[in-house]
Image (spheres, rainbow, N blue to C red):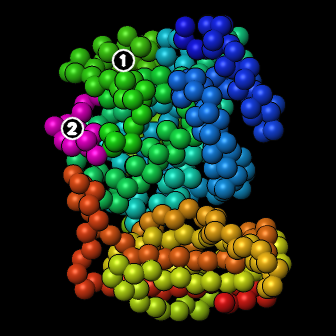
């Protein structure tokens, strides 16, 4: 049995009912059987693992404010204009199709124009859009539509797409996808793959689930015929062998699909300091060491903001907190809890900034760690001897937050 609605074995049906009972404290109106079975299939109907996956997802969505991202996050213009890809029509089974001419992405220009965190948020919005399209198609066709057909065009893909920073962002997005959007991919068709593709695949392969790997299909020279086997010609852009065009006759259907291109340097923000909103403090973080700044949050619901740049290299940054314990209370202090996930920022190219709402009184800790260099084939953490990084930082601390 497939483990989908209408095709469940007695054991799978029983597992679904038990799953509902286990997560009844977090069940929401949109969590119907179609939704819940995604998590069960992703963990081979192992109840404990499926429950853990779903609960971690709910924590992830809360931490990154995913439900309000579309309303509250202003996507940088350079992403909407130059980041490749877009949803366009459906395959022969009514599933949405996402086309990504990834080989045309100006990776270097993009990383000099936005923070890596902006790219991650942009990709999150796309994933949310895909899940919304599932719902729309399901209502339209009167049956569950759950899978995405992905077409990745690697024409003009090269070494510029494989810088360490670019691969790090790709891996971060893959991890988010695998952990939080189960059973999204129906099939991924990779066309015009260059000789370099096996190298790329070897780098990202460890972060793909076995289920995802089984859905990858590398098309040969007859890739147009392969696409037409999955997608009707009138739904396939003329550029990829179909007959679909934009209303103005554009064979690439660029009203829906972004084809990237060289990013104008006017979007670059590596040396732009016009957005700095306070006096900057310069500190040096020794090679391989960690700079920690602690603040005591006296009252809940205050906001701490930060901006920082680094000299020459990227840097890792995260925010953690623990509840403040009164002296002589006899209570044991809790361990640090992650508030803003620790991740690398290309702050040597783009000013890094952000804010966090302190919903509880407690100790707020900023943590900045000098970046590491790694060889792709081993992922070994190799520090450059005697090389430090200079941080230029600014923090806006409310009156009810005191420096420790």
Is 187 situated above or below 378? above
- Mark 2, residues whose alpha carbon is within 10 Å: few (<14), some, or many (≥20)? few
Q: How many marks?
A: 2
Q: Quadrant of the N terminus?
A: top right
Q: Is residue 3 left or right of residue 190?
A: right
Would you identify the image quadrant in which residue 306 lies? bottom right
- Secondary element under disc 2, as helix, strand or loop, is helix
Name the residue that disc number 1 marks. 227
Q: Quadrant of the C terminus?
A: bottom right
- Reply yes or no: does residue 196 show up in magenta: yes
Name the residue that disc number 2 marks. 198
User: 8 or 263: which is nearer to us?
Assistant: 8
x and y percent of residue 285 in the render?
41, 86
x and y percent of residue 20 in the render?
75, 26
- Looking at the image, is mark 1 or mark 2 nearer the viewer? 2
Would you identify the image quadrant in which residue 337 lies? bottom right
x and y percent of residue 269 in the render?
45, 72
x and y percent of residue 373 in the render?
28, 67
Earlier-in-chain disc, 1 versus 2 = 2
- Mark 1, residues whose alpha carbon is within 10 Å: few (<14), some, or many (≥20)? many
Q: Residue at x 71, y 56 (%)?
A: 72
Q: Is residue 122 left or right of residue 379?
A: right
Q: Residue at x 78, y 28 (%)?
A: 21
User: 155 or 34: which is nearer to us?
Assistant: 34
Q: Residue at x 72, y 73 (%)?
A: 332
Stretch of the chain drawn in magenta: 191-203
- Reply yes or no: does residue 298 show up in magenta: no
- Secondary element under disc 1, as helix, strand or loop, is helix
User: 263 or 9: which is nearer to us?
Assistant: 9
């Amino acid at each position: 049995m497939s483990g989908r609605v209408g095709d469940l074995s007695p054991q799978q049906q029983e597992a679904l009912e038990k799953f509902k009972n286990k997560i009844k404290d977090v069940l929401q109106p949109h969590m119907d059987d179609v939704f819940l079975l995604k998590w069960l299939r992703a963990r081979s109907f192992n109840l404990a693992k499926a429950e853990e996956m779903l609960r971690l997802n709910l924590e992830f969505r809360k931490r990154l404010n995913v439900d309000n991202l579309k309303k509250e996050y202003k996507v940088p213009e350079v992403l909407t204009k130059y980041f490749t890809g877009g949803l366009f029509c459906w395959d022969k089974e009514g599933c949405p199709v996402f086309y990504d001419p990834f080989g045309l992405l100006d990776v270097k220009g993009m990383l000099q124009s936005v923070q890596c965190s902006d790219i991650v948020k942009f990709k999150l919005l796309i994933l949310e859009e895909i899940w919304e399209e599932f719902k729309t198609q399901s209502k339209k066709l009167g049956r569950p539509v759950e899978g995405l057909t992905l077409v990745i065009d690697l024409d003009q893909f090269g070494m510029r797409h494989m810088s360490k920073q670019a691969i790090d962002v790709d891996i971060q997005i893959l991890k988010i996808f695998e952990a939080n959007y189960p059973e999204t991919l129906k099939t991924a068709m990779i066309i015009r793959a260059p000789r370099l593709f096996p190298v790329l695949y070897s780098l990202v392969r460890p972060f793909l689930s076995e289920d995802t790997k089984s859905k990858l299909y590398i098309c040969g020279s007859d890739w147009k015929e392969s696409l037409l086997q999955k997608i009707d010609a009138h739904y396939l852009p003329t550029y990829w062998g179909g007959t679909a065009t934009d209303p103005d006759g554009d064979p690439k259907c660029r009203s829906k699909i972004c084809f990237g291109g060289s990013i104008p340097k006017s979007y670059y923000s590596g040396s732009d300091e016009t957005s700095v909103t306070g006096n900057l403090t310069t500190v040096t973080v020794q090679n391989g060491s960690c700079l920690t700044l602690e603040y005591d949050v006296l009252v809940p619901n205050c906001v701490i903001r930060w901006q920082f740049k680094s000299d020459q290299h990227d840097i890792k940054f995260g925010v953690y907190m623990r509840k403040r314990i009164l002296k002589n209370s006899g209570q044991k202090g809790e361990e640090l809890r992650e508030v803003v996930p620790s991740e690398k920022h290309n702050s040597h190219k783009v000013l890094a900034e952000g804010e966090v709402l302190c919903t509880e009184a407690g100790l707020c800790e900023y943590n900045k760690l000098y970046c590491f260099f790694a060889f792709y084939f081993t992922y070994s953490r190799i520090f450059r001897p005697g090389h430090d990084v200079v941080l230029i930082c600014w923090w806006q601390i409310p009156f009810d937050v005191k420096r420790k």
